[in-house]
Image (spheres, rainbow, N blue to C red):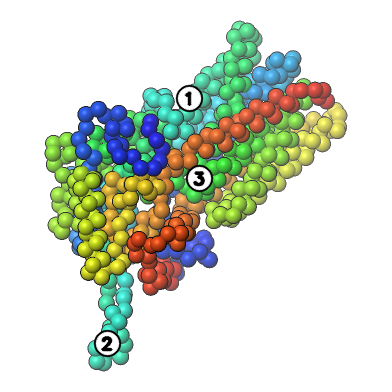
Amino acid sequence: MGRLSGPLADPSGDAGYADRPERVGFFTDTSVCIGCKACEVACKEWNALPAEDDVLTGMSYDNTGQLGASTYRHVAFVERTVDLGMPGLAGDGGDATEVRWLMSSDVCKHCTHAACLDVCPTGSLIRTEHGTVLVQEDICNGCGYCIPACPYGVIDQRPGDGRAFKCTMCQDRLGVGLQPACATACPTESIRFGPLDELRAEADERLAALHDRGVDDARLYGHDAGDGVGGAGAFFLLLDEPEVYGLPPDPVVTTRDLPSMWRHAAAAALAVAGAVAAAFVGRTSR
Amino acid sequence: MSPKRERLMVPEAEFSSYYGRPILKAPVWKVPDVPAYLYLGGLAGVSASLAALADATGRPELRRTGRVAAAAGATASVGFLVHDLGRPERFLHMLRVLKPTSPLSVGSWILAPFGALAGAAAASEVTGIAAGPGRLAGAAAGLLGPALTTYTAVLIADTAVPGWHEAHRELPFVFAGSAMAAGGGVGLLARDGGPARRVAVAGAALELAASAVVERRDRLSARAYRTGRAGAALRVARAATAAGGLAAAAGALTRGRSRALLDGAAALLLNAGSVATRYGVFEAGMATARDPAYTVVPQRARLNARDEGQPATRTGPTSASRSSARSRTES
């Protein structure tokens, strides 16, 4: 066990890998996402994930709804009518409006400090040699602790199976030098895969370019090694607040506060011990 | 989903969300399994400590009551825990590793030896066989008991669930009080259970005080402890615990049949209060996991405060994007 929060340059080294490849990750640039869902399909196919119940959500083109035990990529769709700030065409009498799309392919963040991994009591969740976070399904006993521990609501229990599942970053493909299925399938390179350091540099350049072009709403999410999870292994360029996409605005790994929790629990346990012992001191009525 | 049907639990809090969907995945932990596991662990822990000291001070009935309650509570607690697993046959995987970062791992390593020791002490008590080893086992279980009463608070607080995580300083004391009230309450059933009376009354007082603090803290998630199913359960808990504590205290002033009646009522009320407290805390957390407001509003406020503290390096949200996101989730 290394440190519980804050910047950490080398998670797989911290986990004890002596000989290890570079830490890899995803940079999902939502400004070029076209909402084709090729990532969702490629992920389902490669990982042989079971179908979810068909539901019409009414949430724009998103009938996937959320990440889950059988959905490791989820494309969010937000359609919004915006005022173009120009006079309308003759006849319609009003200002011109148009639908502005926000589309973003969400995925497990593969946190530098991953709460799911920290709280897993069986050792099923591990840090891989690539610096990613992986569930070993032959170990998982379905205790469900990782599920509420995740500050992003990523990992979930598969009904009928009982175990917890999430994105593996295609561990099997990484092992033979391939890219994850989603990044391979993405036609616009909205999903980029590579060494995390390189992706972070690319993201900084992309953000600066967008700001130069007047796209003031562009912002990076999860790229900062000083954030509440020590930086995400999968980070994003977003065009609105994270919560608009269903992402927590300022997530913190819960185990950051674990030392304080154990201190308070120890104090409370000592209070119990003291109170019970004190109850036997002196005369009692019977 | 129809916007008309969507009712936010915290209507005064303005925030954006993705179609009002929760950010977190709510725990898959079931009722009654997990609330029962929390309650029984507390009951067993305090009962074991009472039994150990009763043994040392020559109170055979309290020792017997405590040993049996500790063993029964620990066994049932383990049963509920195993039943709640997605793969119950893999329960022993809990003991594959000992991970200090996982309160459930640490807890399993407290509960497993506790259960074995408390079971041995109770077996010796009931059969009369091997009184010496039984005494040692009982003493060891009594030492582990207090840890058993509070680790479960860390277990639920060490999650992203706002109602639990934000209460991580107070919950161990809520659980400690709840455990003392329950264990002390059962101890009242022994005719030489004088010390149990003190433990029961002190536990009821601690449970009431610590719960009141959790419910009144100046944070959004405190609201979940006052409203809905959790609020109702905690109101029942408060009434039962207060009445049980008073009955236990009043029992000291009476004798004979009326004392037995008061003590029986106190035992029942304190344990009902303890159960209701655990269930209420459980439901409060669930409510804060299901409603994105509890996740987004405090995080957004924290972020905005941080951004105001230093020159903004990235573009903040425009008021237009905020209000249109708002209208998407609520209009």
* Mark 3 neighbour class, 10 Å CA radius: few under 14, some 14 to 19, many 20 or more: many
Marks 1/2: CA distance?
A: 70 Å
- Where is mark 1, residue-wise? B109
Q: Mark 1 lies on which chain?
A: B
Residue B316, quarter of the rendered image: bottom left
* Mark 2 neighbour class, 10 Å CA radius: few under 14, some 14 to 19, many 20 or more: few
Marks 3/2: CA distance?
A: 51 Å
Instruction: Find out whether the residues at labels 1 and 3 contact each other: C-beta distance under 8 Å.
Output: no
The image quadrant where one finds the N terminus of chain A is top left
First in residue order: circle 1 vs circle 3: 1
| Mark number, residue B165 | 3
Instruction: Find out whether the residues at labels 1 and 2 contact each other: C-beta distance under 8 Å.
Output: no
Residue B299, quarter of the rendered image: bottom left
Q: Which chain carries label 2?
A: A
**What amino acid type is highlighted by mark number 2?**
Gly
**What amino acid type is highlighted by mark number 3?**
His
Q: Which chain carries label 3?
A: B
- Where is mark 2, residue-wise? A88
Residue at left offset 68%, top offset 43%: B208
Front-most of B81 and B132?
A: B132
Front-most of B107 and A31?
A: A31
Vertical comparison of B80 with A29: above or below: above
Q: Is residue A69 visible?
A: no
Label 1 or label 3, whichever lies nearer to me, is: 3
Callout 3 secondary element: helix
Percent across and percent down for residue B174 are 62, 40
Percent across and percent down for residue B227 are 59, 55
Residue at left offset 31%, top offset 60%: A219
Label 1 or label 2, whichever lies nearer to me, is: 2
Callout 2 secondary element: loop
Q: Can residue B120 be seen in this view?
A: yes
